Image (cartoon, helix red, strand yellow):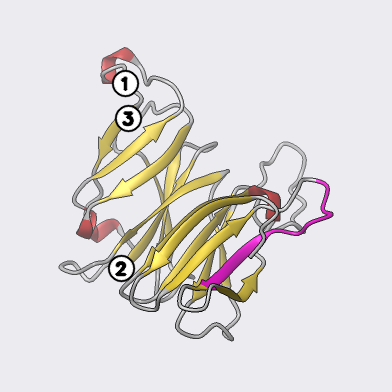
Amino acid sequence: MLFFAPALVAIDPGLNLAVVIDQGDPYGTNEGGAMVVDLTTNRVTAWFSAGTAYFTSGLAIDPVRHLAFVSNALGDPTQNPPDGQPYLGSLTRINLSNLSQPPVAVTTNEFPNGVAIDPGTVSSKHSAIVLNTQSNDITAVNVDNPALTVTMPFAASGGNLALDIAWQPDAVLGLVLTGSAIPADLGGNNAFIIGIAPARLP
């Protein structure tokens, strides 16, 4: 296997598959995307585009539904926002149980980065939670019906350049990592804990 610019990897242990994000290059001579690798044969079994290839920015796998979620900072490469309006990112869902199924992409807010999965083992709210760096908020996406989304600000405001997120089951608590320290009145650190009530998830 040879990737041009591998950036992220995650594994579905139930299916023995790995998903590798290959970012390609900014000049378009090597198109990137999401590569699905069979760990029993060490071969790429599928390739999927995931928005603007060079800006694939986050990856998470739902091991319960066997779904991969890829965030893309610039989203749909054909979008043409009006003057003064931002480019919006996207989240692409890939069905690892059925690789012939076309991926499903939904719009997030500005410049999505980290992705975390809430498996909904208690609340039944099964969500992919995307951290939007530029707009400083979170987009939650229903994993079974990605058309159901909700975007909400951080419970602790003031995060600066939020980069990644990790999540406990059932949206009890999450940890957000930022690129620089948040204001002193919020602790002056570059990581903070947030919480989202399950009822707020789609």
**Residue at x 38%, y 26% (from the top left corner):** 158
How far across and down, in percent of the image, does residue 160 sit?
45, 26
In percent of width and height, residue 169 lies at 21, 58
Visible residue check, residue 88: no
Which class describes the residues within 10 Å of circle 1: few (<14), some (14-19), or many (20+)?
some
Q: Earlier in the sequence, mark 2 or mark 3?
A: 2
Q: CA distance from mark 1 to mark 3?
A: 6 Å
Q: Secondary structure at mark 1?
A: loop
Dot 2 or dot 1: first in sequence order is: 2
Q: Which residue is mark 1?
A: 189
Residue in the picture at 29% in, 38% down:
155
Residue 61, above or below 66: above
Of residues 110 and 24, the one nearer the viewer is 24
| Element type at mark 3 | strand
Which residue is the site of mark 2? 126
> Quick one: quadrant of the N terminus?
bottom right
Give the quadrant of the C terminus. bottom left
Q: CA distance from mark 2 to mark 1?
A: 30 Å
How many C-alpha atoms fall within 10 Å of the one at disc 3: few (<14), some, or many (≥20)?
many
Do the residues under discs 2 and 1 have CB atoms within 8 angstroms?
no
Q: Is residue 10 left or right of residue 29?
A: left
Verify whether residue 159 appears in magenta. Answer: no
Residue type for callout 3: Ala
Give the residue type at disc 2: His
